[in-house]
Amino acid sequence: MAAVRRPRFHLLIVLALVAFVVVGFAPSYYLRILTAPPPLTTLLHVHAVVFTLWMALFLGQVGLVAAHRVDLHRKLGIASAVFAGIVVTVGVLSVFKTAISNHVSPSGLAPPQFSIIGFTSIGLFAVFIALGIAYRRRPALHRRFMILGFIASISPATARILRMVDLQPHRDLLIPLCAGLFVAACLVHDWRRHRVVHPVYVVGGIAIIASWPVRLMIGRSDWYFPIGEQVARLARTMFGS
């Protein structure tokens, strides 16, 4: 019985994460045929498609483990790693593109300074996924790092959901709180199953949650201003805008 419960939880938490992202991006992407939002650039389309495919592959991988098809899970591991690398690459390019947009963040950051938000999210995603791949032969570490990587990537979806429910003024509190709720679910599962919480979830969860006020502080600092401006200059060189 215990062998079945463990993957079932991870399947449920990943389903919840996928649903959360889909809801967040439904008006601007998944249901855009109904909502008619402003047109997207080719890069943003590519970013959306790549991340959607990665989510589908991630969900499939967790489903294979839940179905006790670890053999297929391992065979698809290379594809998952490649897609994660593409997600990081396209994500970094998207951050550069955003740095030359005309949108000022509700947090009060101009586009060049807002780049720290995206770079941090992508950095956390990349680190957790890389650790998950590195520890692929140690399932207890592997699955926790991979789930933390997913949780680290949901802040854009969270921001859009907050906009939908008119809570955007409180985004700087609620974005890390939403990530914290997913981490808390993982901690509760660990405690119920093992009567102890795994340090990977504790340390990784703190890193994700604490990163939000830290990145806001960096974005508003005097020393990051020239860095953000340099990001914008590089973006204009890359995209010609």
Image (cartoon, helix red, strand yellow):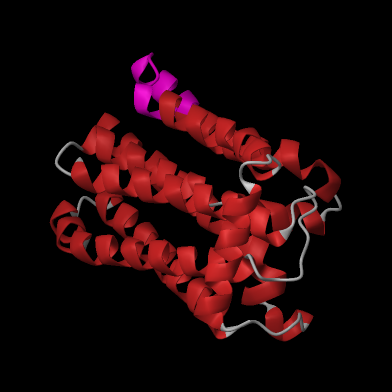
Given residues 105 and 131, the one toward you in this image is 105
Q: Is residue 5 left or right of residue 51?
A: left
Start-end of magenta stretch:
187-201
Residue 100 sits in which quadrant?
Answer: bottom right
Residue 22: where, in percent of width, then height? 59, 64
Quadrant of the snapshot with the N terminus: top left
Residue 238: where, in percent of width, then height? 50, 78
Q: Is residue 137 left or right of residue 173?
A: left
Query: Is 189 a magenta residue?
Result: yes
> Does residue 157 appear in this view?
no
Q: For the point 77% across and 47% down, which residue is it?
A: 107
> Does residue 79 appear in this view?
yes
Query: Is 130 a magenta residue?
Result: no
Q: For the point 65% across and 82% down, which residue is it?
A: 40
Magenta-highlighted stretch: main secondary structure? helix
Residue 63: where, in percent of width, then height? 33, 55
Given residues 53 and 134, the one toward you in this image is 134
Residue 240 sits in which quadrant?
Answer: bottom right
| Residue lying at the far top of the rendered structure | 195
